[in-house]
Amino acid sequence: MTETSYSFHGYSFPAAIINCAVRWYHRVNLSLRDIEELLLERGVDVTYESVRNWCDRFGPQFAQCAKAVRLRPGRTWHLDELFVKLRGEPYVLWRAVDEHGMEIDVLLPKHRDKAAAKRFLRHMLRSNPVPRKIVTDQLRSYPAAKAEVPELAGVKHVFVKACARGNNRAENSHQPTRWRERQDAGFP
């Protein structure tokens, strides 16, 4: 982010302080009063209302700029699904990661069937280029859904044997989700 792309004219604080406060609020998920306190420790006397105004004014612009420079996902997609409980209801968390481990997309339907897999594939193709290869476990919903999505006709489909400690990038990407689920005894 360059300071010249945003208009800080008329604000009584330097652009670096405004950038820092907005980043802390949106990226580190600190409260407005926490940011006020952190800035005060650094010698900047600002109210939490000013921080709120900055976040309202510059937050969407920063998000738009960050989205524009977002890295494109790799050309190999690893797809997997796992069951999670939300408010006592079972859901299926469909996840896709690329060969670098970057999360491509997430979908949370109630069912694990061909319709949900097709919806997930179409959802990923809306915002990402067509991959060269798709790596999945042996769930039958994947090839059935892939056959119905014409954009994926020439894409190679590789099956891996699903096991609890498999060396599959998608299986390993669930570890933080499972860890949090164990800590919280289910999601709220």
Image (cartoon, helix red, strand yellow):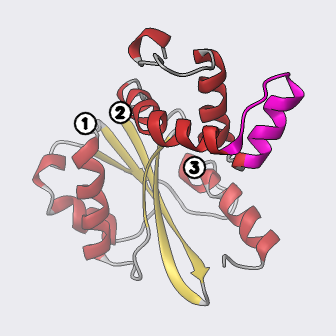
The residue closer to the viewer here, 62 or 44, is 44
Where is residue 33 drawn, in percent x and y?
76, 48
**What main secondary structure does the magenta stretch of the protein show?**
helix
Mark 2 or 1: in front is 1
Q: Is residue 34 one of those drawn in magenta?
A: yes
Residue range (magenta): 33-48
Q: Which residue is mark 2?
A: 75
Give the quarter of the figure containing the C terminus.
Answer: bottom right
- Mark 3–mark 1 contact, CB under 8 Å? no
Disc 1 residue type?
Pro
Q: Is residue 181 one of those drawn in magenta?
A: no
Rendering quarter of residue 175: bottom right
Disc 3 residue type?
Asn
Q: Residue furthest right?
A: 41
- Mark 2–mark 1 contact, CB under 8 Å? yes
| Residue drawn at x 40%, y 32% as measured from the top left | 61
Counting residues from the start of the chain, the first of labels 2 and 3 encountered is 2
When the figure is inspected, residue 39 is found, relative to residue 102, above or below; the finding is above
Q: CA distance from mark 2 to mark 3?
A: 16 Å
| Residue drawn at x 48%, y 60% as measured from the top left | 80
Q: CA distance from mark 2 to mark 1?
A: 8 Å
Counting residues from the start of the chain, the first of labels 3 and 1 encountered is 1
| Residue drawn at x 26%, y 66% as measured from the top left | 119
The residue closer to the viewer here, 153 or 14, is 14
Q: Secondary structure at mark 1?
A: loop
Q: Is residue 155 rendered to the left or right of residue 186?
A: left
Q: Which residue is mark 1?
A: 129
